[in-house]
Image: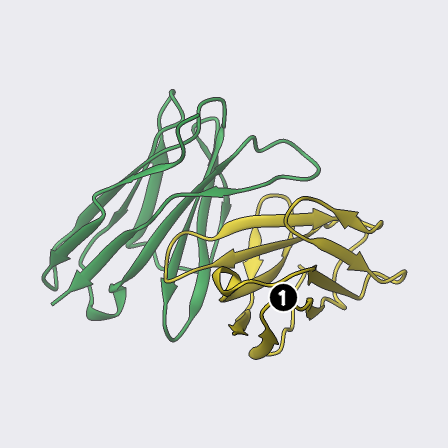
């Protein structure tokens, strides 16, 4: 099962890129890496996912290392509304493991 | 399209009582999973149902149970409530197929046990 490790908190200036790292050294070859975020105890919101290749969507970019042991979520231009807890999780056939997440504080 | 709907949103129970929470998934989604979120333990996987069958189960006592109906709606039940069961209970739905599986979460049901 993919256990993930993330820094507990990070700060980012508004308008700058936020780079959130995640270590998932126990991930297996067929497990996707997913990123979600949670704002004020609402339900987690999906951001992006990937398996081997880097991915980009309208919200963020996901960079996965070649050995798949770590990844980085990039929010290209962080806004105050991006302040949230960001979770990097692995999926073992529909069993998702949420770690403690990273509290991203976007400051003006 | 309508999102994942959880009811009730808030409820208060006393120790020893039981509670049933409901989750209506996104139309077409066949998988429903449940999570418990507490300040101390974070988000923890309870169980997952797919086509009316429990497919995965987390490490929770037997007091926590669930079921899924033919229309994919799901309920979870907690019997003999304890103070430690106070939490935000989140439901998520997905297509449940193999490969990448994106979960869509509901807003949650916040349970307070007194």
Bin the neighbour count of mark 1 within 10 Å (Cα to Cα): few under 14, some 14-19, many 20 and up.
some
Task: Tell me residue A106's x, y (percent).
Answer: 54, 71
Quadrant of image for the N terminus of chain A: bottom right
Name the one closer to the observer, B42 or B69: B42
Which residue is most to the right?
A66
Letter of the green chain = B
Relative to residue A23, is residue A54 drawn left or right? right
Relative to the observer, which residue lies in front, A33 or B45?
A33
Instruction: Kindly indicate the quadrant of the structure image that contains residue A5.
Output: bottom right
Residue A93, by quadrant, is top right
Write down which chain is painted yellow: A
The structure residue drawn at horizontal position 88% and vertical position 63%, both measured from the top left corner, is A67
- Placement of B43 over or under B72, stated as above or below: below
Which chain's residue wears label 1? A
At 39% from the left edge and 28% from the top edge, which residue is drawn?
B2
Name the residue nearer the viewer: B68 or A72: A72
Q: How is the image coloured?
A: by chain
Circle 1 residue: A15
Residue nearer the viewer, B78 or A12: A12
């Amino acid at each position: 099962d993919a256990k993930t490790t993330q820094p507990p908190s990070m700060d980012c200036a508004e308008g700058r890129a936020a780079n959130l790292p995640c270590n998932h050294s126990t991930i297996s070859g067929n497990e996707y890496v997913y990123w979600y975020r949670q704002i004020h105890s609402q339900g987690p919101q999906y951001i992006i996912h990937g398996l081997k290749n880097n991915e980009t969507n309208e919200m963020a970019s996901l960079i996965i290392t070649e050995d798949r042991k770590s990844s980085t979520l990039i929010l290209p231009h962080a806004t105050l509304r991006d302040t949230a807890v960001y979770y990097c999780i692995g999926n073992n056939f529909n069993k998702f493991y949420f770690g403690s997440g990273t509290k991203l504080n976007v400051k003006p | 399209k309508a999102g994942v709907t959880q009811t009730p949103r808030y409820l208060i129970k006393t120790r020893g009582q039981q509670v049933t929470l409901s989750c209506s998934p996104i139309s077409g989604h066949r998988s429903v999973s449940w999570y418990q979120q507490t300040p101390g333990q974070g988000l923890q996987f309870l169980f997952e149902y797919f086509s009316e069958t429990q497919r995965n189960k987390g490490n929770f006592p037997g007091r926590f149970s669930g079921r899924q109906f033919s229309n994919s709606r799901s309920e979870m039940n907690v019997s003999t409530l304890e103070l430690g069961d106070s939490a935000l209970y989140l439901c998520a739905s997905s297509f449940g197929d193999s490969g990448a599986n994106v979960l869509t979460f509901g807003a949650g049901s916040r349970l307070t046990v007194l």
